[in-house]
Image (cartoon, grey):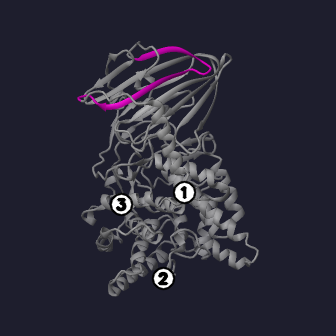
């Protein structure tokens, strides 16, 4: 992934940019080969001869360097998107490192998700424009270019010490083409921006570099003008190859709020935490009855879902979806996530917002009316509404947060919130626990477990060493880990109303790491964490899911939730190792310290009705 904090491009190992949406993450793609073929838009630069490939980011940045080694020589392609410029651009620099290498460039621009062929014109000796409707891309290069089969192609060679450049810039077709960029200047500015930002990363022991790369990825998925963080850079990358579980993740989920805040705050990025909190408050502003589970990157509410008939999908995984119908679902847990995010922001030192106090009380008035109802649950099921245990727990958390919040200013209202929290807590313990196995179940009356139950100890619903929590963790390990990583739930139950299966959910696997730390099983936590970190690709990126059998990533990519979970687990695990290593502590004291995990550290956790 390369990006400019407004949008991203995905670059393959063979030098092709196969996915790019302009001018925002959620705009229509002009390169959509990722979900189809090269005829749906792609920009490839590679050696003419066979080559071995190695890739790496320039230290602490999103500047990607791909080295192609051929028999005749070695060449490096540097890909980056300048930050803090008026228009989004992709700059590709081809530099000879040794010998002489013959190169090819193949550019197929297809606006509107791969269907609209632009009108290409030469407007200068080395300048070309591609126009379709309101969109325009301007290409400037030092290499010769000609048209061939509705594509722009080039053949050139690079010797050691020589550099060929391409700059592709987006603008509106009814405006003059953007002025040329000073490539050396914007490269230096971009490197400085990323290194200065990533250099602020706090220490996480042996995992500091892993955490830093994940935080850079999260920054790259942030829409700088608003502070919104998209769940992923892509749409419709499948959770099962050839299946229908293909969703558009280029939006912002309220559910991610607390984990994201914690990741930024734990790593020392208070400005980013404050920007995300402020985005959250703007997005949810309005009637509490209209609270959504997700919004557009500027807070847009209308995200209608439709399917693209002309794109066959990644490895023929159809349909390709744009928009997300889950934005209209009822999910009780988002109220808890919202309250928790505001509480964590306040506790972490994020400057208070005048909107927060009023919005919290209005939200709880609405939640008190609806918490007894079934909902779609955390996994946005498209089947029958149910009384999901995780949803009820997060409803409890919402009332618990305000019922125990310091300086709320109204003891009577807080006492009421605590009574509601106790009522919800009792109902969950009465109806959400398997009477025989004494473990929490997916929904009231079920026998199945769900990986979302791993959050119960993390949010403090019960202490980690409560037998029901320990039994739940054991059941998840026994039933949702057929290949050593955690499934969200058993899709064979058809609770989600969909056909097919899916891979192991990486965020859930990190949640298990957190639970193992809370249970004092540090060796098991370390083993699982090391395996998860080993799944990153060659430049440190993670998708939403992983197929342990096929040994491949699944789902949208790169996935913010996976990287957020990695950051929090890494910091928590490093903290637990440091505390456990203190020789003056007894075993009991060490275990107690391990229980003081990130969300567990707020006073009052796990007491109501326990």
* Front of the two marks 3 and 2: 3
Percent position of residue 251, x then y: 38, 49
Residue 500 shows in this picture: no
Percent position of residue 459, x then y: 50, 70
Write the start and end of the magenta stretch as one range.
Answer: 151-174
- Residue 591 bears which disc, if any? none
Q: Earlier in the sequence, mark 1 or mark 2?
A: 1
Distance between the Cα atoms at labels 1 and 3? Answer: 21 Å
Label 2: few (<14), some (14–19) or many (≥20) C-alpha neighbours in 10 Å: some
Q: Is residue 31 magenta?
A: no
- Residue 565 bears which disc, if any? 1
Rendered residue at 64%/63% (across/down): 573
The answer to whether 553 is drawn above or below residue 606 in the figure is above
Q: Are marks 1 and 2 in contact (CB under 8 Å)?
A: no
The answer to whether 572 is drawn above or below residue 149 in the figure is below
The residue that disc 3 covers is 278
**Most foreground residue, 580 or 374:** 580
Q: Secondary structure at mark 1?
A: helix
Q: Is residue 166 magenta?
A: yes
Percent position of residue 92, x then y: 49, 28
In the figure, is residue 563 to the left or right of 496?
right
* Front of the two marks 1 and 2: 1
Q: Earlier in the sequence, mark 1 or mark 3?
A: 3
Q: Secondary structure at mark 3?
A: helix
The residue that disc 2 covers is 609
Distance between the Cα atoms at labels 1 and 2? Answer: 29 Å
**Most foreground residue, 296 or 374:** 296
Distance between the Cα atoms at labels 3 and 2? Answer: 33 Å
State whether the magenta stretch is mostly helix, strand or loop: strand
């Amino acid at each position: 992934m390369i990006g400019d904090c407004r949008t991203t491009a995905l670059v393959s190992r063979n030098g092709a940019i196969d996915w790019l949406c302009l001018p925002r993450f959620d705009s229509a793609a002009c390169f959509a080969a990722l979900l189809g073929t090269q005829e749906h838009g792609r920009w490839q630069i590679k050696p003419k001869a066979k080559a071995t490939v190695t890739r790496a980011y320039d230290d602490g940045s999103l500047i990607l360097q791909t080295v192609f080694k051929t028999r005749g020589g070695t060449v490096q392609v540097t890909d980056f998107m300048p930050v803090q410029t008026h228009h989004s651009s992709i700059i590709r620099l081809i530099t000879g490192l040794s010998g002489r290498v013959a190169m090819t460039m193949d550019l197929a621009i297809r606006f509107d998700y791969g269907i609209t062929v632009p009108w290409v014109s030469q407007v200068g000796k080395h300048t070309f424009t591609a126009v379709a409707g309101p969109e325009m891309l301007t290409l400037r290069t030092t290499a010769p270019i000609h048209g061939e089969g509705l594509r722009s192609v080039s053949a050139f060679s690079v010797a050691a010490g020589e550099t060929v450049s391409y700059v592709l810039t987006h603008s509106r077709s009814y405006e003059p083409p953007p002025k040329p960029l000073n490539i050396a200047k914007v490269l230096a500015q971009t490197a400085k921006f990323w290194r200065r930002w990533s250099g602020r990363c706090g220490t996480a022991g042996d995992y500091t570099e892993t955490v830093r790369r994940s935080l850079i990825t999260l920054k790259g998925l942030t829409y700088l003008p608003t502070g919104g963080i998209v769940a992923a850079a892509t749409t419709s990358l499948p959770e099962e190859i050839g299946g229908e579980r293909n969703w558009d993740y280029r939006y912002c989920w309220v559910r991610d709020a607390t984990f994201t805040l914690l990741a930024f705050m734990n790593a020392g990025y208070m400005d980013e935490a404050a920007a995300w909190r402020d985005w959250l408050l703007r997005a949810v502003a309005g009637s509490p009855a209209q609270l959504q589970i997700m919004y557009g990157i500027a807070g847009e509410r209308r995200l209608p879902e439709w399917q693209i008939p002309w794109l066959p999908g990644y490895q023929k995984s159809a349909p390709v979806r744009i928009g997300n119908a889950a934005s209209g679902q009822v999910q009780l847990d988002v109220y808890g996530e919202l309250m928790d995010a505001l509480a964590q922001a306040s506790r972490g030192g994020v400057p208070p917002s005048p909107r927060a106090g009023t919005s919290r009380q209005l939200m709880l008035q609405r939640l008190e009316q609806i918490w007894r109802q079934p909902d779609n649950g955390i996994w946005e099921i498209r089947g029958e509404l149910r009384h999901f245990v995780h949803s009820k727990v997060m409803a409890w958390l919402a009332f618990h947060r305000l019922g125990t919040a310091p300086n709320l200013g109204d003891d009577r209202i807080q006492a009421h919130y605590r009574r509601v929290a106790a009522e919800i807590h009792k109902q969950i313990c009465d109806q959400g626990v398997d009477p025989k196995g004494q473990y929490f179940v997916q929904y009231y009356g079920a026998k199945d477990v769900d990986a979302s139950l791993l959050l119960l100890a993390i949010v403090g619903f019960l202490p980690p060493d409560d037998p029901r929590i320990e039994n739940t963790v054991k059941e998840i390990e026994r039933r949702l880990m057929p290949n050593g990583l955690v499934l969200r739930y058993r899709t064979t139950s058809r609770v989600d109303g969909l056909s097919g299966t899916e891979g192991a959910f990486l965020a859930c696997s990190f949640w298990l790491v957190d639970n193992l730390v809370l249970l004092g099983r540090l060796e098991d936590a370390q083993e699982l964490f090391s395996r998860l970190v080993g799944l990153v690709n060659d430049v440190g990126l993670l998708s939403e899911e992983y197929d342990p059998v096929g040994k491949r990533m699944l789902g949208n990519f790169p996935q913010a939730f996976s990287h957020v979970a990695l950051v929090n687990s890494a910091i928590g695990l490093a903290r637990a190792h440091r505390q456990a290593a203190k020789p003056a502590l007894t075993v009991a004291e060490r275990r107690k310290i391990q229980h003081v995990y990130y969300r567990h550290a707020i006073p009052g956790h796990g007491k109501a009705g326990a």
